[in-house]
Image: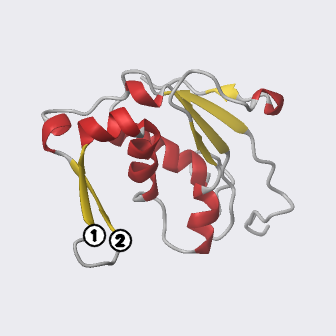
Amino acid sequence: MSTFMANAKTVAPKWVVIDATDLVVGRLAVTISNVLRGKHKPDYTPHCDTGDFVIVINAEKVQFTGSKWEQKEYQDYSHYAGGQKITPAKEMLEKKPEEIIRRAVKRMMPRGPLGYAQLGKLKIYAGNKHPHQAQQPQELKLA
């Protein structure tokens, strides 16, 4: 008997909806990255995209532990002199709440073509509406 190795022909990705209301960003990001990579499935294969599509709703209602709302900062750099921009977490929540989750998940994914493709299956929305009803996503409950 040989070991089963998944490939692009044998994988049928599903769609999953996660409600981010009152969830801690880091713990949420771990779950999302595991689902995107397919580590929650018994046929997980590291070199193949066996993951599912993930839809995150209510991104503006996520939580941080401790005093991270005041202390955490997001840094961007334009590669020009004086082009460094530092954005506090509170301001990021007001301007781009989806970016908080996207950056947390991105740093938990592997770097390379496979990781970038898997990250493309992540859809994040600030409100509770999403345009993916036709894919019939299943709700994933997180505690």
Q: Secondary structure at mark 2?
A: loop
Disc 2 packing (10 Å; few <14; some 14–19; many ≥20): few
* x 67%, y 44%: residue: 53
Q: Give the left or right position of residue 54, taking residue 92 as reference.
A: right
Q: Position of residue 98 (x, y in %)?
A: 46, 40
Q: Residue 123, position in %: x, y?
A: 61, 42
- Mark 2: amino acid: Ser
User: Residues at badges 2 and 1 in contact (C-beta under 8 Å)?
Assistant: yes
- Residue at 81 percent across and 49 percent down: it is 12
Specify the amino acid type for callout 1.
Answer: Gly
Which residue is labeled 2 in the image? Answer: 78
Q: Quadrant of the C terminus?
A: top left
Give the Cα distance between marks 2 and 1.
5 Å
Mark closest to the chain's N terminus, 2 or 1: 2
Residue 29 in the image: state x and y as whole percent.
42, 44
State how the image is colored.
Answer: secondary structure
Q: Is residue 46 visible?
A: no
- Quadrant location, the N terminus: bottom right
Q: Secondary structure at mark 1?
A: loop
48 vs 91, left or right, is right
Considering depth in this image, is 38 or 121 the residue closer to the camera? 121
Q: Is residue 63 above or below residue 103?
A: above
Q: Is residue 94 visible?
A: yes
From the viewer's perspective, tell me whether residue 48 is left or right of residue 32: right
**Residue position for label 1:** 83
Residue 84 lies, with reference to residue 119, above or below; the image says below
Front residue of 111 and 31: 111
